[in-house]
Amino acid sequence: MHPDRTGDPDPVPPTDPIDPLPPPGPLPATGPVAVDPLDPDPHLLVWRPVDPRLVWVLLTGTFVVGLVAVVAAAGVWLASGGLLPPALATAAVALVATRTVLARRAVRSWGYAERPDDLLVRHGLLVRRLSIVPYARMQFVDVTAGPLERMLGLATVTMHTAAAASDARVPGLVGAEAARLRDRLTALGTPAAEGL
């Protein structure tokens, strides 16, 4: 301990006011609890799942694409021969099998939650995605149902905003729930938009 010029035995090094970051390393155990950015308000939100029959919609689309790929590969093979078309057909069958295994998990990954000012939609297996759509930003709500969805009594609700990239959709809703969500989003979006 050598005193510096001012006579202080242990001078405190000056802190950098521009970079007040803590030193690298793990955060202290007494610090704030880490929050999952993909699950805001985990104890306050009630996440609603989509209908499990959505699996059949996904699988039907997968099988149609796989069947077209196999038939095209078979046609090319019969016309020209060679090893490439059977390899393509095998790859198509493998992709269909993989998608079939993952379809259940993909449907279970979908969920939505309603808050007083916005709607949250989450989905994704490998890359999880959370979309937060403020009611005030919604321009209109769209409900669609393809032939297979109609057969199963399902529909998709899509929220459109001014920015096309921020549109969100909730597939696989039972017809009554799709109508309820559409009416609720429309009712909440109108007064919020009038306040802008």
Image (cartoon, rainbow, N blue to C red):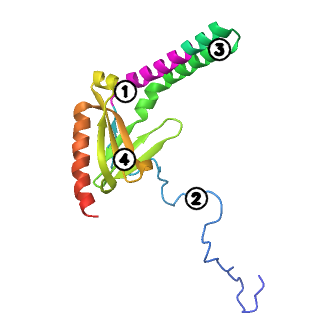
Q: Which mark is residue 54?
A: 1
Residue 85 got which mark?
A: 3
Name the residue located 32 percent from the left edge and 52 percent from the top edge: 138
How far apart in space, not on screen, are marks 2 and 3 (Cα)? 56 Å
> Sequence order check: which comes first, mark 3 or mark 4?
3
Residue depth check, mark 2 versus mark 3: number of the one nearer the observer: 3
Residue 39 seen from this side: no
* Distance (Cα) linking label 4 and label 1: 19 Å
> Which badge, 2 or 1, is on the more N-terminal residue?
2
- Residue 81 lies, with reference to residue 25, above or below; the image says above
**Quadrant occupied by the C terminus:** bottom left
For disc 2, the marked residue is 27
Q: What stretch of residues is rendered in magenta?
A: 51-70
Ranked by sequence position, the earlier of labels 3 and 1 is 1
Q: Nearer the viewer, mark 3 or mark 1?
A: 3
Distance between the Cα atoms at labels 3 and 1? 32 Å
Kind of residue indicated by mark 3: Pro
Q: Is residue 135 visible?
A: yes
